[in-house]
Amino acid sequence: MSKQIELALLSLMPAHGPELPTSLVELTGSLLAQSRHRASTLKAEEEVARHYACANIACDRLKISLNLPPIEPRPPVPPRIYKRLYTHLDNILPNSSTTPRSSRIRTPRSSRQDIAESPASSARQLPSRCTPSKETSLSQFRTSKASQATPIKATTALGLHAWIQPVVRYLCTETGNRKLAPTVLAGIESIVAPGGQRTEDVWVCKHIVELVATIYLFVMMRVRAVTSGGAIDRESYVPMRKEIISCLTRARGDVIRNGSTNVDVWDGWKDVKTREFDAAVAHINGTDWLAGDWYKSIDDIVSSTREVEYPDEPVEDLSGSASARRADSMLQEKYDFLSDARRADYDSWKEKMLFKICQASMASGFAQVDP
């Protein structure tokens, strides 16, 4: 769990115990990642409260289904700025059947008396919606095998090729990284269809399959840097490349058997060779595609999916330490220059440099051998 997310949630719910619900933590991390993609440029005073606002939105959306204690916001910025930030993020972040809003229309007191006295009002019933159950609220975070086998549709709302979404889900599922599928899709979308419009980049249009494969590779490299701090060398790069190419080769047949027989949806598809894969990796290393918010948010996604571990100490000590590092105190994460996020950024930079050195060595002296 990200330390900022934990502190923000504990500050919002001072009456809650130290064991935060997993669904609440996952929703906060998801909203934070999506906010960096949908609202990448915030003012300096608003960026300070991004974590806190996302945690507040998550608490408000799940307070009924999780029966949360009273929420007491104490943002680290002035109320006027925080209210504007909260309203902006709440409007742009998707909210699918989490916390229904009241549809009541306020009317003047005199109008309400006239309506109450009219005979027609007694027979008319106001529309109402039932409060969603816990299973309904959490259903959006659960996937089943049936949903993974969704047939390919001829069109896509993201402006991507129709086969990209099911193939990415298949690739992540086969390699045991199903939770990373939204991140991989976000990276592909930012390159192939920025702003919802298909790109005119000639290289992207000709190497779309290689792009999908290499974006997945770079996501896995970032995840490894965050979790273990290790970089990918040639000994680990070759098996990963072989596994990705093998999964893509099987994806065409498996996705068709899952229900799609339309040949038109496979526009731009081709089998990827080892040399093409290496060339795509070298090309992406020379661009700024990995400088986007979707790539930087991998740290928060990985941290939010980790199991929460607490030391064997009394609850009083844990709550006391949490209050000492609350999000509304002067001890902010941005002043912690040895934090996990700062270390992960350094590991990512080191990993990229070592990977470029490996690519240069392979191009100058090593022979390319197909697996």
Image (tube, rainbow, N blue to C red):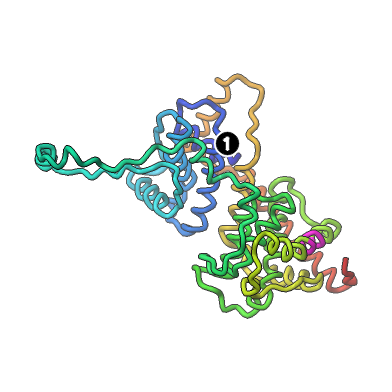
Residue 220, quarter of the rendered image? bottom right
Q: Is residue 229 left or right of residue 42?
A: right
**Amino acid at the residue labelled 1:** Thr
Q: In x, y percent, where is residue 321? A: 55, 28
| Residue drawn where x is 41% and y is 49% of the image | 90
Quadrant of the snapshot with the N terminus: top right
- Does the segment drawn in magenta span residue 244? yes
Image quarter where the C terminus lies is bottom right
Magenta-drawn stretch contains 22: no
Secondary structure mostly seen in magenta is helix
Residue bearing the label numbered 1: 22
> Which image quadrant is residue 106 in?
top left
- The image position of residue 293, as x and y in percent, is 56, 58
Taking the spot 46% from the left edge, 38% from the top edge, the residue there is 62
Q: Looking at this view, is 151 or 342 the one in front?
A: 151
State whether residue 48 is above or below residue 248.
above
Q: Is residue 175 above or below residue 324?
A: below
Residue 50 location in percent, x, y? 47, 48
- Give the total of numbered labels: 1
User: Under tag 1, what secondary structure?
Assistant: helix
Q: Nearer the viewer, residue 358 or 172?
A: 172
Q: Badge 1: how crowded within 10 Å, few (<14), some, or many (20+)? A: some
**Most foreground residue, 65 or 275:** 65
Q: Which residues are magenta?
A: 241-246
Whether residue 339 is visible here, answered yes or no, is no
Task: Judge left or right: residue 97 versus residue 262.
Answer: left
